[in-house]
Amino acid sequence: MSDYPWAAFAAGLGWAALAALAVMLVTFALALRKGVHRIVDAAWGVGFTAVAAVSAVAATGEGDVGRRVLVTALTAVWGLRLAVHIARRGRGHGEDPRYEELLGKAPGNRNLYALRMVYLLQAALVWLVSLPVQAASYGPDGLGALAWAGTALWAVGLAFEAVGDAQLARFKADPAAKGRIMDRGLWSWTRHPNYFGDFCVWWGLYLVACDAGGAAAAVSALSPLVMSYLLIGGSGKRLLERRMADRPGWSAYAARTSGFFPRPPRR
């Protein structure tokens, strides 16, 4: 751990925090102009991309160039694909019911409450969850087996996300599917292929950080655990399934389909 550039990494943490904050503040200004806060969901992937890019620049002259390029590219491909997908999905729609419910609890000004409880919180989460990306950028040694294992796991995750999102979009576009539960393709193997994909992406990026050495692994170990909690027990699977519980056919679908990790459907 003694070879790790701790001073440069500490300075980079500050630049990464500023990048995440800037993305969310710009998004907040756009949300006020448009009158909807749902656009913050698209900013999630943009925030991670900005942090990765800033970290790569801040680590210039410190970390291995190959690892910086790899981890920045992996983060940007994942983040920008997610941002474009969410932006297209939300085009033409009003406020997200989640934000309507949250802002209904605002004790004062709704927009200032949204700034505190949504934008600033998401900026902090982007900074925390992206620690593997930041730490990997400063690893001094060349790429090893763990980096490629992490890249392979990242690729599995991206495939689950992209294919799952495309399958769901086609299903929703079919008028005959209105009112039905999506139970085809990847959605027959797991109720949440997109969340499982995110899970694989961030554990893959953590493996890339582990490849940078024990110091990078240690300082970023909390991040994939936090993302896993958000996906499974936080605002992901748990919240979505609570909203879906009363849909016709949901109970039968849930009984035969894995809740998270893919497996063949039960008969």
Image (spheres, rainbow, N blue to C red):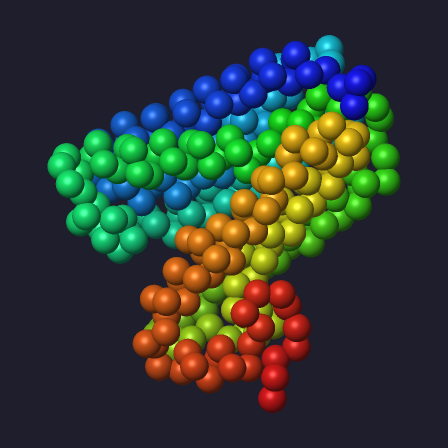
Q: Quadrant of the C terminus?
A: bottom right
Toward the bottom, the furthest residue is 267
Q: Residue 227 versus residue 151: which sits nearer the camera?
A: 227
Instruction: Identify the residue at image location x=45%, y=69%.
Output: 171
* Residue 104 coordinates in the image, percent (x, y): 17, 49
The reply to whether residue 230 is in sight is yes
Which residue occupies the foreground of this view, 56 or 241? 241
Image point (18%, 43%), residue name:
106
Name the image quarter holding the N terminus: top right
State the residue lying farthest toward the left: 108
**Residue 13, horizontal then vertical, whole percent:** 56, 21
11, above or below 93, in the image: above
Q: Position of residue 164 (x, y in %)?
A: 55, 61
- From this view, report whether residue 90 is shown above or below residue 163: above
Q: Is residue 167 left or right of residue 23?
A: right
Compare residues 153 and 177 and report the one nearer the observer: 153
Residue at (13%, 37%) from the top-left corner?
A: 108
Tell me the residue at 54%/45% (across/down): 226
Q: Nearer the viewer, residue 106 or 244?
A: 106
On screen, 219 above or below 60? below
Residue 133 visible, this orientation: no
Q: Is residue 148 left or right of residue 75?
A: right
Q: In this rendering, would 216 be left or right of 93?
A: right
Relative vertical location of residue 117 with respect to residue 256 in this rendering, above or below:
above
Quarter assignment of residue 111: top left
Which quadrant of the structure image shows residue 5? top right
- Residue 83 point in image, percent of width and height: 46, 41
Numbered-mark total: 0
